[in-house]
Image: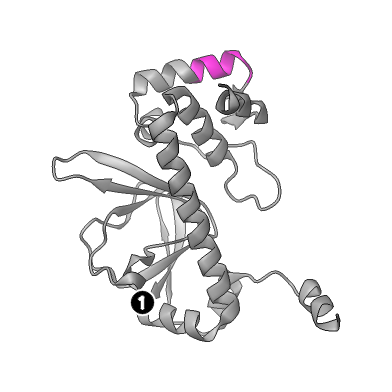
Amino acid sequence: MARSRRRASSPRFNPQTFLESAGATSTVVTYRRGAVIYSQGDPADSVMYLRKGNVKLSVVSSAGKEAVIGMLGPGEFFGEGCLAGQRLRMGAAVARNGATVMTIPKRTMQALLHDQPAMSDLFIGKMLARNIRIEEDLVDQLFNTSEKRLARTLLRLASYGQLDAPATVMPAVSQETLAEIVGTTRSRVNVFMKKFRELGFIDDTHGLRVNPSLLSVVLRK
């Protein structure tokens, strides 16, 4: 009983504070909008932790076609493939609107995960959540219309940085990027955005704000 009370009253584990105070061998770099954090084919020798900003993950095919595979917000890890034996980056990571990134060498990250249970639990939790999100995206691409996929993308982007309640303000993102994520054309995204605006689902008067009622488009049969 006493042990449970102590665990419940302990402060939430903060990976950024831990990484900064544990003396981990790491570097922190701030990237400007559009800056490349790493490119596809670069050596995979470190794990990244996103402190501030947003990052786009993408893959380019041999034919030169780019596919956006992830949009990350503060508090997320990426580049973790090196821990599973990847020697080269399978995709690219680009700062969308500027990003502050902590780079942790592979061996340092392995030691932290082995020696620090709280860090290991948090990292595994984030990776599982990412895997679930990827599965949901796959189902979305296979069975939903582009309009529903766009609505779901906007709702997801608007919730970046929120732990308990969804945010309504979406980080700036171009229609071209939205088209890449959704898997449609920019002209189709433009049509849907206009429709969402007319129905009151979004408001771009002062930045793009997403109304939670947009969820009705996702749930519509």
Position in image of residue 16 (x %, y %): 56, 70
Which range of residues does the magenta coloring cover?
193-200
Q: Is residue 46 above or below residue 151?
A: below
Is residue 197 shown to the viewer in this render? yes
Position in image of residue 10 (x %, y %): 76, 75
Reply yes or no: does residue 76 show up in magenta.
no
Circle 1 residue? 106
- At x 56%, y 75%, the residue is 119
Who is closer to the viewer here, 57 or 141? 141
Q: Is residue 213 above or below residue 23?
A: above
Who is closer to the viewer here, 17 or 5? 5
Position in image of residue 59 (x %, y %): 27, 48
Is residue 76 shown to the viewer in this render? no
In the shown orientation, is residue 62 left or right of residue 93? Answer: left
Who is closer to the viewer here, 87 or 162? 87
Q: Quadrant of the C terminus?
A: top right
Q: Is residue 90 above or below residue 102?
A: above
Please, what secondary structure does the residue beneath circle 1 have? helix
**Amino acid type at image mark 1:** Lys
Q: Quadrant of the N terminus?
A: bottom right
Reply yes or no: does residue 195 show up in magenta.
yes
Crowdedness of circle 1 by 10 Å Cα count: few (<14), some, many (20+)? some
